[in-house]
Amino acid sequence: MTSMDDFWAVIPAGGSGTRLWPLSRRSSPKFLHDLTGSGQSLLRATWERLAPLAEERVIVVTGQHHAEAVRAQLPMLHRDAVVTEPSPRDSMPAIGLAAAILERRDPGAILGSFAADHVITEVEAFHGAVREAVVLARRGEVVTIGVEPTHPATGFGYIRVGEPLGVEDAPSGRRVREFVEKPDAATATKYVESGEFRWNAGMFVVGATTLLELLAQTHPELTATLRIIASDPRRISDLWPTLPKVAIDHAVAEPAAAAGRVAVVPARFGWNDIGDFASLATILAEQDGAPPLRVIAGEQDVVAIDSTGLVAADSGRAVAVVGLDDIVVIDTADALLVTTKERSQDVKRVVEELQRRGLSDLT
């Protein structure tokens, strides 16, 4: 496989993964962990997926507290390929800063933004979708990759697919009719049954300058500030706190879709954002020879009898689970979580309560 000389892979590596607490913390977020038993962290797996497309043209945008851990996991990157943000400002400032840097470095750059903490199977299909997306981005489109839904998920946003674009080297490309927020179960079922919708996996491919020009239409001050920081990185400490917290979907993708500027490449490959322990359990259950109860850490310390679900024993203590179905037990040195797969979305409420009590050191 050959890379594309104008394609740059941007990996936003942020967030704390509160629904995966206490494994994922602010100090050690989920993208730094091997959660699937692959032998590498989610971040490293993301880089390996993108390297054949971009070679050395990779930028990771991460928090300043995680920069050294990122560099340790990706020692092949040049030091300036790890861009640090002083504080989380959501996805648009992070991706926009990468775009502003690329605009100065390579004015014709096409950037593709891919989160550091997603799991993707059928990598060849992923590569094919990205290549089509780059073809469309060269024409001035904002392009998203729409994942074919396997079930009526309520935890993902959806993309409504429109008419084919008829581009020879991107035959799958279609116009985006609209982005829709996370639906309830009944609406999600209608979406999947209609065949008109794809999961919004948050993957965007677009020219760096095109992205900034579109952002300037809705957030001119944000765009100007990002360009100032790119031209003089020493000013980031002063200017970064002034930036609004806004997602790329709201800042660019949705208004651009309303203006007919967004394309989608519908794609078929396995995708999961490991949003909670239930989704992690689903990934692990799909692996060959998966037992009914999966141990993701400390297998020698776990005793499971007539039980199903997910256990991590990372404290050095013995953990025994007897006669429980779909259980989630996460035992670390300073925190113990016991819940069920059904209630795993609510784990973030534990983090919120700990913060309310002033116990932020546990989060």
Image (cartoon, grey):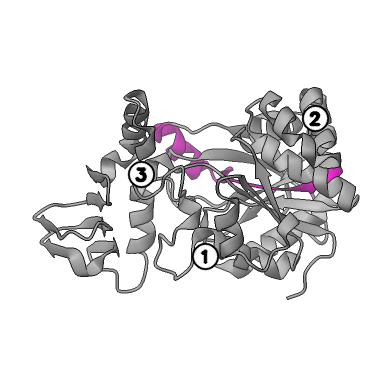
Asked if the stretch drawn in magenta spans residue 203, the answer is yes
Q: Is residue 316 above or below residue 146?
A: below
Nearest to the observer: residue 60 or residue 148: 60
| Residue linked to disc 3 | 21
Nearest to the observer: residue 226 or residue 170: 226
Front label number (2 vs 1): 2
| Residue linked to disc 2 | 225
Gap in angstroms between the C-alphas marked 2 and 1: 38 Å
The mark that comes first in sequence, 3 or 1, is 3
Gap in angstroms between the C-alphas marked 2 and 3: 34 Å
Q: Secondary structure at mark 1?
A: loop
The location of residue 32, given as percent across then percent down, is 49, 56
Read off the magenta span.
184-209
Q: Is residue 208 above or below residue 56?
A: above
The location of residue 52, given as percent across then percent down, is 70, 70
| Residue linked to disc 1 | 121
Which three-letter amino acid code belongs to the residue tagged 3?
A: Trp
